[in-house]
Image (cartoon, rainbow, N blue to C red):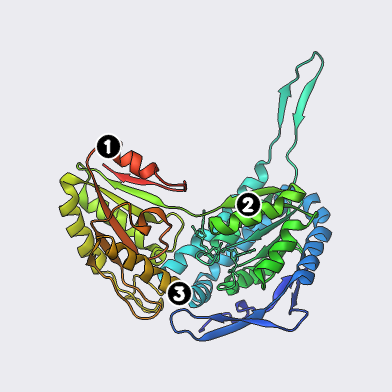
Amino acid sequence: MNLKDASLLQTRCLIGGQWQTADSGRTLAVTNPATGETVAHVPDMGADETRRAIAAAEAARADWAGRTARQRADILRRWFGLMTEHTNDLAIILSTEQGKPLAEARGEIAYGASYLAWYAEEALRLYGDIIPGNAPGQRILVLRQPVGVCAAITPWNFPCAMITRKAAPALAAGCTFVVRPASATPLSALALGELAQRAGVPPGVFNVITGSSRAIGAELTASDTVKKFSFTGSTETGRLLLAQCAPTVKKVSMELGGNAPFIVFDDADLDATVSGALAAKFRNAGQTCVCANRIYVQRGVYEAFAAKFAAAAGSLKTGSGFDAASDLGPLIDDKAADHTRAMLADALENGGRVLCGGSGAGRFFDATVIGGANTQMRVAREEIFAPLAPLFVFDSEEEAVALANDTEYGLAAYFYS
Ligand code: NAP
């Protein structure tokens, strides 16, 4: 990696302000999905190190919560400034481990940093309420106070932004934080740790641990010291972690999977719809929770939309994130590539037609539009998480709404009319 500031590439974990290796000395390889090369090794930590990270967060809690909101805001603002200053290096790290095109990676760094700026401002507005009582001579006073140590597990598709979106509000409120990033993308999290230190986040307030998802997840969820747990990832894993949190009755936030409908009505402006659909479907090679999954097109414009959309999708270039011409980078790993091919094969077996794309080498897969999609196909029911865009035809608005709602997921939805 050709970084201006090489010390952003941290390969040890941050616990209590100290960079640490795993007790066992074991490491995990971080792979560049575009080339298959190992780019770094990070600690393979487990339960003991997790307990230490939680203890460090607990030890730092009283001092951090005791500072003024302005002091916390100033530190978050400095962290934001450092992220912005180092956008290019952070984007290189992100694109190297995750694969997304560099321009998208820069966009994610700006988006991730924006949470720090926003919550630096919100830190100053932790107002309470004075509410009339229900008996004479009483007033009810509501204070907002930090819940304590917060823990998070984050996914690989937005390795930077999914951390700042959780850490910034926690730190702004006076909570301390332990994050365990996805195994595929730990380097972005560790770079955030480095910048947090430089911004003046005190030791123990922001801890980053890498390693076994089960061992670390089990400790974070079972700990009595952790008062709030936040997870972004698949519904399947979320369900498991939610159950693990239940015995300690901690506060929990879950941001899980999606199966977004994208509805195109007969009266839509087709050019605007095509550019909206490209962005909603193919960002991050389709590996985004709010990606358009099922594209429903009203019969009157179906052929015209399909032709324009397939022409536009067919012109997207797939390649290394470091090639400025690439619109789609590689999929995250071989499993994701196999999943893409299996979803496509199932759609074709069930009567679908490839209108553009349909192939790719290794982890690369071209933007693919599937015509004649129907409810028998896996792409209708499952989160696709790949650059496959199935087109379904519908007649009435009622039918489109019923089809759109016919899913167990509820995260995002789009329509053009
Ligand atoms: P995932 O398999 O659920 O993994 C997410 C995180 O959970 C990773 O850090 C993973 O670690 C960890 N994990 C897996 N099994 C675990 C276990 N038994 N105990 C503790 N941690 C465990 O999901 P993913 O494939 O990485 O991410 C894609 C999913 O995230 C999609 O469903 C997407 O929709 C969702 N997502 C949702 C939002 C939102 O805002 N709603 C945003 C982004 C993504 P490893 O990396 O080591 O497996």
Which residue lies under the disc numbered 2? Answer: 120
The first of marks 1 and 2 along the sequence is 2
Q: Residue drawn at (53%, 58%), measured in percent from left and top?
A: 234
The Cα–Cα distance between marks 2 and 3, rounded to whole angstroms, is 30 Å
Q: Nearer the viewer, residue 352 or 303?
A: 352
Q: Where is residue 403 in the image (x, y as percent from the top left)?
A: 34, 43
Marks 1 and 2, how far apart at CA: 43 Å
Locate residue 397, reporting x and y percent: 27, 37
Q: Percent position (x, y) of residue 64?
A: 78, 55
Residue 397, which numbered label?
1
Is disc 3 placed on a helix, strand or loop? Answer: loop
Q: Residue at coordinates 60% horizontally, 79% vertically from top-left? A: 9
Residue denoted by label 3: 99
Q: Which type of secondary structure does the marked residue at label 1 adopt?
A: helix
Can you say which quadrant of the picture contains the C terminus? top left
Left or right: 61 as drawn, with respect to 296: right
Most distant residue in the top direction? 136
- Residue 358: give x, y in percent of width and height: 28, 71
Q: Looking at the picture, does residue 91 appear above or below residue 175? A: below
For this rendering, which residue is in front, 218 or 42? 218
Q: Do the residues labelled 2 and 3 touch (CB within 8 Å)?
A: no
